[in-house]
Image (spheres, rainbow, N blue to C red):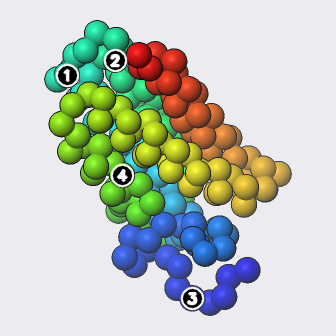
Amino acid sequence: MHDGTPQGPPGGTSPVIADRGIIDRGIIFTAVAFGQYRWAAQQLSEMLGKWATEHPEPHTSALLATHGHQHAEHASAFAARVPCVGGLAVDDATAPLAEVAHLLARARSAGDTAAFVHRVYEEALPALEGVYRRHLAATDPRVDGPTARVLTLAARDLAEQQAAATLVLTP
């Protein structure tokens, strides 16, 4: 239940109320949630694509590029879920997702491919998958099927990416 405490956009806070794992279902809050998910997916797409081209170890380059494209698709799907209300544009709703922003910054600062892969696939992706799954658990697909579909797809892709990285990148 929502206790009346402001849970919306100020401060760029996540839509997941951390201490209770509850999603406030207000329309502005929904815009913020999908704006933040879009931001995370954009960051991952850009980072993976850049690393794949600038640090082209043969066994990782194709995997990173493929996963970067999947995150670009997620960003597009999340943008489509941002409700158009009160003049709020998708770009206005796109803001850092607190649960993963610091993890993505750590990955971005990695000095070598092994550290980068570890930080993305063993830190950032599991955290992001958890955010998506908590939102999905609070979503009734009978009421909001499109949200359930996009969250299911994104969470499944993240789980598959983690598994693929383990198989392909483990020496």
Q: Earlier in the sequence, mark 3 or mark 2?
A: 3
Q: Earlier in the sequence, mark 1 or mark 3?
A: 3
Please name the amino acid that badge 1 sits on: His
- Relative image position of residue 127 (x, y in whole percent): 50, 50
Please name the amino acid that badge 2 sits on: Thr
Q: Which residue is mark 4?
A: 103
Q: Nearer the viewer, mark 1 or mark 3?
A: 1
Which quadrant: the N terminus?
bottom right
Q: Earlier in the sequence, mark 2 or mark 1?
A: 1
Q: Which residue is mark 2?
A: 60
Q: Look at the numbered discs 2 and 4 and tell me whether their residues touch, using CB distance below 8 Å.
A: no
Q: Which residue is mark 1?
A: 55
Is disc 3 placed on a helix, strand or loop? loop
Q: Nearer the viewer, mark 3 or mark 2?
A: 2
* Residue for point 44% across, 36% down: 121
Is disc 2 placed on a helix, strand or loop? helix
Please name the amino acid that badge 4 sits on: Leu
Q: Look at the numbered discs 2 and 1 and tell me whether their residues touch, using CB distance below 8 Å.
A: yes
* Separation of marks 3 and 4 at Cα, in angstroms: 27 Å
- Relative image position of residue 168 (x, y in whole percent): 46, 16
Q: Earlier in the sequence, mark 2 or mark 4?
A: 2
- Relative image position of residue 45 (x, y in whole percent): 35, 35
Q: Which residue is mark 3?
A: 5
Choose between 66 and 110: the one closer to the eye: 110
Please name the amino acid that badge 3 sits on: Thr
* Separation of marks 2 and 4 at Cα, in angstroms: 20 Å
Q: Look at the numbered discs 1 and 3 and tell me whether their residues touch, using CB distance below 8 Å.
A: no
Are there few (<14), some (14-19), or many (20+) residues within 10 Å of tag 1? few
Image quarter of residue 159: top right
